[in-house]
Amino acid sequence: MTRKSIITQSPGRINLIGEHTDYNDGFVLPAAINKKAIFRLTKNGTDKDINIYSENIGNHFSFELDNFNPIENGWENYVMGVINELQKFGAKLKGFDGQFGGDVPIGSGMSSSAALECSLSFGLNELFDLGLNKWQLIKVSQMAEHNFVGVKCGIMDQFTSMMGKKNHVMLLDCRSLEYQYFPFDLGEYQLLLLNTNVSHELASTEYNTRREECELGVKIIKNKFLGIKKLRDVTLEMLQQNINKLPEKVFKRCRHIITENQRVLDATSALVKNDFHQLGQLIYQSHISLQKDYEVSCPELDFLVNLTLKKKYILGSRMMGGGFGGCTINLIDKKQIAKFIEIADKEYQLEYGKSLTPYLVSIENGSGIIEK
């Protein structure tokens, strides 16, 4: 089908549990949500002129297909990064105009960047009949972030945005890329996100630092245990045997990844049994590990998690996403949501002098075409 224009959408995501495990070849349990990035793409009849408009930010950006490079900071790198990776795949692109917008909150930990990348790569694949499959588009979107944005992210965000399934969470093995959908019906409970409205000022630099610390841990541990490629291969017993060889900080980073991988697998078992109390406990354990061992939380996130601890109608709460801001994800009794939002907002304002933003999210499908 030859198209002159197309409108595509890709969603943001939540991650029920499994934080920072993806770039360690581990397990994650994410889902696509009802917050989306929408791209409108139109062929403009030129060979190489690209014109992009960001509706949310309100500015234009133009470049040529044979002449572009990363800039200091900005959304433009995500766009150019996707095009750069498509060209590496041999994609025959021509000039086009694009405009994008959406309602995935930036800096919230819902992965607005992956939603943008996937919406654009999916749309260009359809508009120019590139013939790439979804896994190739996932890789294009991930590598755009590596090579143009400078964040060495794992594959979870782009996978979830592209492959999401309505009312299902997904267990993804980030090594084999095998995945399994799990029906997600929480009964009397609901997922509530509370956005701290704190920006990820440290997120990109500290993200890459955490990755380097994990790689250092693997390098040291594999001197004693052959066949170790990533922290996915390391057990707690192996880690303990290397406690005197690892810097304390690196030991803690490794311990988070190893225990978090097990929590993901335990969470899928809890879902199958509809044991939401067990799921909630795993979510709390995840936050403590992210706070104490991986050290990617922040006072605002910890404050909101602590607010939930003595409330029996909340089964679990933790920070979600890369860290240093963004949202907490809360497993809460539906009947108590309004009351808790009121309590949390009041306490948060008293403590930090700013409001939080609540989001009730539903689980939706991944990337697709919006028909006119």
Image (cartoon, rainbow, N blue to C red):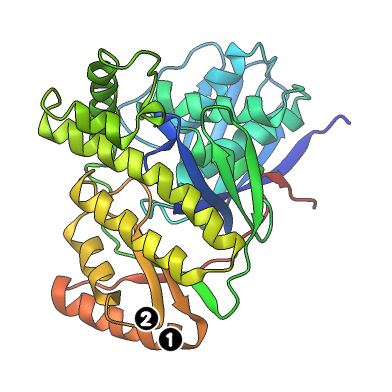
* Observer able to see residue 98: no
The part of the image, by quadrant, that contains residue 208 is top left
Report crowding for label 1: few under 14, some 14 to 19, many 20 or more residues within 10 A (C-alpha): few
Residue at screen point 56% across, 40% down: 172
Left or right: 113 as drawn, with respect to 177: left
Residue type (three-letter) at the residue carrying disc 1: Ala
Tag 1 secondary structure: helix
Residue found at x 11% / y 34%: 248
Q: Position of residue 358 (x, y in %)?
A: 41, 72
Q: Which residue is mark 2?
A: 341
- In the rendered image, residue 232, in percent from the top left (x then y), is placed at 41, 30
Q: Is residue 348 left or right of residue 171?
A: left
Q: Is the residue under label 2 in contact with that under label 1 (CB below 8 Å)?
A: yes
Task: Please tell me whether residue 296 is drawn above or below residue 62 in the rendered image.
Answer: below
Q: Amino acid at mark 2?
A: Ile
Answer with left or right where residue 315 lies relative to residue 267.
Answer: left
Q: Residue at x 52, y 49 (%)?
A: 29
